[in-house]
Amino acid sequence: MTKNGNLKRRVRARAAKTGESYTSALRHIRQTIPGHPAAKSVRLAVAQTSLFDDPRDISGLQASGMEMRRLMRDAHVAGAQLIHFPEGATCSPNKRIMSETGPREIGISDWSRFEWAVLREELDATSKLARELEIWTVFGSAHQLSSPHRPHNCLYVVSNRGELVTRYDERMLSNTKISFMYSPGKIPVTFEVDGVRFGCALGMETHYPEVFSEYERLDVDCVLFSTTGESPSAAPAFAAEALGHAASNKYWVSYSSHAPQSVAVPSGIAAPDGQWLAQCGSDGVPAIAVGNIEIDPERTARLWRRTARADLYMPHRVHDDPRSDGRNTF
């Protein structure tokens, strides 16, 4: 048996004995191998929050901020280094409330209805708490642009020092968003926490595998995908795609949606094997789920897939053989 085969046998034996996941057992086994590179790890909290959809409502904007900060404190107590919130965690503006011709008709959004000053107060309070708790905080919001441009639907990334280090803007917008509400983003966004590389996706982008394969090429270890979930009936498809992206790209995916969607699929952390590592409750209640994102330093399966996608099979193809070219004989 090869050296790699022996390692796999030892890992499976430990996992069967201890009940650990394969990834956890692999990490413990490798710690006993002299000179082996240490696995990277980040403790991640994924949140599901209440849905606030009226940006004219000052008390609602304040309540969303307070709820986010309560969950940040819960994540800090649980030892999380990063907390990930849904799309529009601060407020997910309702297309009918925003419509100039609404609410019966969906038309061009009137963004003067948004209480931007109140939002800014909540953003500042959230950044301040991130610094106090020393926790990275990634959350969905609307990002105001210069007039007359529409806002971006975005994810803000606030560091454990309370600094806004980057922002991801949703690129693959829905028909309603692009027609009436938002300006699309332009680029993928990555950042690192303790050597673990994260990418961001948003809204309905789980429907687009090219977004997730692009992050694989950018060498991310985990994609933070935030969504409103649209409706409980749509949530299973979004979650199934998140699991599929994790398995096909061999990286972690954090899936964060609003609490009302949890009755169908709660927020959770998808492992590279396409299974849930942790999930929030399915009772419609705002909550967090916490798990360790552990990165295999060798990532042999992921490296093999990159090799396979780079014309690996071309020199092995058979040409000018009638038994290969003909498709109408057994």
Image (spheres, helix red, strand yellow):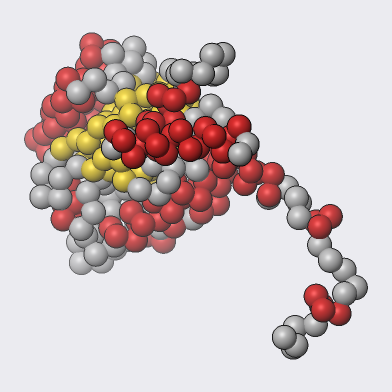
Residue 73 lies, in percent from the top left, at: 16, 22
- Residue 140 lies left or right of residue 68; in this view the side is right
With 177 as the anchor, is 325 left or right in this view? right
Q: Is residue 101 visible?
A: no
Image location of residue 14, percent across then percent down: 37, 33
Indicate the position of residue 213 as horizontal and vertical percent values: 55, 47
* Residue sitting at the far right: 320
Residue at horizontal 29%, vertical 33%? 18
**Residue 279 visible to the viewer:** yes
Q: Which residue is painted at 56% across and 38% down in the image? A: 5
Q: Nearer the viewer, residue 250 or 72?
A: 250
Residue at the extreme front:
1
Q: Nearer the viewer, residue 301 or 193?
A: 301
The N terminus is located in which quarter? top right
Specify the quadrant of the image occupied by residue 29: top left
Q: Is residue 110 above or below residue 25?
A: below
Q: Quadrant of residue 23?
A: top left
Q: Determine the residue positioned at 74% across, 88% down.
A: 328
Looking at the rendered image, the quarter that the C terminus falls into is bottom right
Q: Residue at x 23, y 11 (%)?
A: 132
Left or right: 261, with 17 as reference point: left
Query: In front: 273, or 310?
Result: 273
**x, y (%) of residue 85?**
28, 36
Camera-side residue of 298 and 218: 298
Label total for image? 0
